[in-house]
Amino acid sequence: MFYFILFWVALAIIAAVIDIVTSNLLYVLFSVGSVVALVLALFGFSFLIQLSVFCIITAALFIFLYPIVRRAAQEKIPRTKTMEESYIGNCFVFNDDLKKGNLVKYKGIYWTMVPNGSENEIQKGDMVRVIGIDGNKLIIEKYYYNKTI
């Protein structure tokens, strides 16, 4: 019986440490199941019952509690934009005439520039603004004096 108690305490501690290290909120569910099994071990239940309850409690927490905790954590932590997403809204002077399929180097990366809608009048020297990204294409539009035309 002492070994079962030691086993559940060790499993709870190891799972809690792994959860702290990974910041995953996943392994703490094993700790909760271990504590419940530890209580059963203290009351003298057989190891098979302890293991069964551990599995049932842990599975129930995974099914019902983990999605709720994960969703709540994702809502509270702001999403970090990728480098490419930070380009949206940036303005720059277009240094080439816009032709179908031509590549333009922007911030060290070659992109295919696509005009927004029917705006095919973008020419060399025009001020443009990035309004979106579609795969390897930057969607751009003309930009004048802080007012889009």
Image: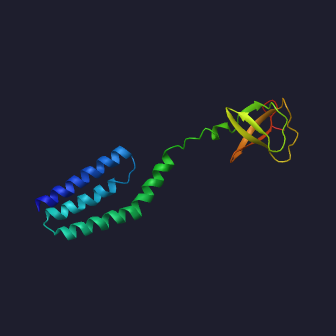
Q: Is residue 15 above or below residue 40?
A: above
Percent x, y for residue 41?
16, 63
In the depicted view, which residue is nearer to us: 138 or 127? 138
Task: Give the total of numbered labels.
Answer: 0
Height in image: 68 above or below 122? below
Residue 59 shown left or right of residue 141 in the figure: left
What is the quadrant of residue 53 in the picture?
bottom left
The one of 95 and 131 positioned closer to us in this rendering: 95
Report the residue at 55% width, 41% height from top. 80
Residue 21 point in image, percent of width and height: 35, 44
Q: Is residue 5 above or below residue 111?
A: below
Relative to 16, is 130 on the left or the right? right
- What colour scheme was applied to this rendering of the protein? rainbow
Relative depth, front residue between 74 and 11: 11
From the top left corner, tell me how far across and down residue 54 is, in percent.
Answer: 27, 64
Measuring from the top left, give residue 121's x and y in whole percent.
88, 39
Task: Judge left or right: residue 125 versus residue 130.
Answer: right
Name of the residue lying farthest toward the left? 2
Residue 29 figure quarter: bottom left
Write the residue at 83% across / 44% down: 100
Quarter of the figure with the N terminus: bottom left
In the image, what residue occupies the spot 49% across and 49% down?
Answer: 74
Is residue 77 positioned above or below 69 on the image? above
Q: Quick one: quadrant of the C terminus?
A: top right
